[in-house]
Image (cartoon, rainbow, N blue to C red):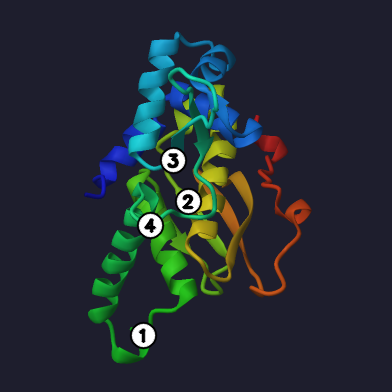
Amino acid sequence: MVPRAATSYRTLASISRITLLLHLQRRGTMTVGDLAEAAGLHTNTAREHLQRLVDDGFITCQPETRETKGRPRMLYSAAAGHTEPGSVRAEKAAAAERRGDLVRKLLPLVAAESTPRQRQIDALDDHLDASGFDSDHDPDGTHVHLHDCPYSEMVKQHPEVCTVHFGLIKTLLEQTDGPLRAEQMHPLAGPDTCTLDLLVRVLEPALDAADEAPAVIYAPSDY
């Protein structure tokens, strides 16, 4: 069953979970001990937060491959662009597509087409709604405006929250195969509004890894 909309908001509203996500996005695969030390948390506390992130599909957990006897360590990673069938992220993407299809059935036939790009927009809108954002798209589809950020108080003390959210959106669009790519996030580009820049790309040839680094641009007036 796909988590209800409020679940993602509650999961991401914890600075401890945001910190754990940030370390995984920046450093790659880590053990619970390494994450607990990096985040300044007790190991048991870190494990509870990590399980919440796993349950909501933001990270994955796999046992360490080892040739010696003994219980393998669990290795945590930020959810990657490839989505495993049956995973929480795959179920979320499928649910977003179903909801989008239901909405389009209520629209005129000419507007009811489902394309890879539209499926990406469905997934993005579903994620933003589940995370507590009010959003709208520019007519050309290359900018998304996020209003009334539910994490604004947390961002004042921890601006890295925006970096984590951008990373989640970037991965989401990669997981939902299509032409859209998250290019940049502009926190507080307007009154109580952040702007996400989307790039419409040609699917072939593939982009070089060096071209895919996430970017969050802060305006000087933000601080």
Q: How far apart are labels 4 and 2 at the CA level?
A: 30 Å
Residue drawn at the location 54% of the way across and 53% of the way down: 81
Residue drawn at the location 40% of the way across and 51% of the way down: 128
User: What x and y, as percent, mark residue 116?
Assistant: 47, 74
Q: How far apart are labels 2 and 1 at the CA level?
A: 24 Å
Tell me the residue that label 2 is attached to. Answer: 146
Q: How far apart are labels 4 and 1 at the CA level?
A: 29 Å
**What amino acid is found at the position of numbered circle 3 in the picture?**
Phe
Q: Callout 1 environment at 10 Å: few (<14), some (14 to 19), or many (20+)?
A: few
**What amino acid is found at the position of numbered circle 1 in the picture?**
Ala
Q: How far apart are labels 3 and 4 at the CA level?
A: 15 Å
Nearest the eye: 14 or 55: 55
Residue drawn at the location 44% of the way across and 61% of the way down: 136
> Mark 3–mark 1 contact, CB under 8 Å?
no
Nearest the eye: 178 or 102: 178
Identify the element where label 1 is drawn.
helix
Indicate whether 178 appears above or below 22. below
Residue 58 tag number: 3
